Amino acid sequence: MKVILLKDVKKLGRAHDTVEVSDGHALNMLIPGKLAVIATGSAKKEAAARETKVASMREIDAQLTAQNLATLAEARIVIKTKANEKQHLYDAVGEPEILAAIKEQVHVELPSGTIRLEKPLKELGTFEIPVSVGEAFGKFSIVIEAE
């Protein structure tokens, strides 16, 4: 039986794909679980329309992400925190602190998990921070200063 997937199904396909599955799998698993619909003419047209809509939304998201990464690359982000006389921080600066500083200073909101730090920052200075949002990658600089 041919079905059109409504959601990504592991080992079967991605959303909007038309796949051939056994009748039992389609009728007992996919259709009742709202993971697929039977591939009729009207369902194929609806799937194609949804796919073009999703593709346009992905393109808009990619453009917005590229714009946000460009804005971050040009910005100067400063985080002030307490440090000792050897320029070591009392409390490490990690992703939550960096995201809060970006939101406050640059007015760009990034989802959590996009900043790729190997380990939290524990010293004063200027650091290059790698960012990956979806398929877009970039870097920006932050400055950690003593209060």
Image (cartoon, grey):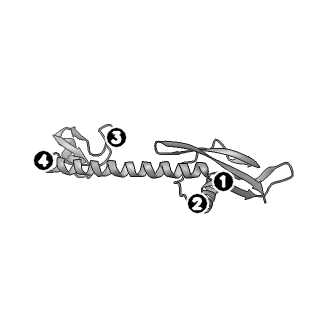
Task: Identify which amino acid the numbered label 2 is placed on.
Answer: Lys
Task: Identify which amino acid the numbered label 1 is placed on.
Answer: Arg
| CA–CA distance in space, label 4 to label 1 | 54 Å
Task: Identify which amino acid the numbered label 3 is placed on.
Answer: Lys
**Residue 103 — which label?**
2
Task: Please report whichever mark, 3 or 1, sits nearer to the chain's N-terminal start.
Answer: 3
Tell me whether the residue at label 4 lies in contact with that at label 2, contact meaning CB atoms closer than 8 angstroms.
Answer: no
Single out the mark in the foreground, 4 or 2. 2
Residue 98 at x, y = what percent?
Answer: 63, 54
Tell me whether the residue at label 3 lies in contact with that at label 2, contact meaning CB atoms closer than 8 angstroms.
Answer: no
| CA–CA distance in space, label 4 to label 3 | 25 Å
The quadrant the N terminus occupies is top left
Q: Residues within 10 Å of mark 4 (few under 14, many from 20)?
A: few
Residue that numbered label 1 is attached to:
76
Residue occupying image coordinates x 54% and y 49% = 70
| CA–CA distance in space, label 3 to label 1 | 43 Å
The quadrant the C terminus occupies is bottom right
Residue that numbered label 3 is attached to:
10
Residue occupying image coordinates x 64% and y 41% = 118
Residue occupying image coordinates x 52% and y 52% = 68
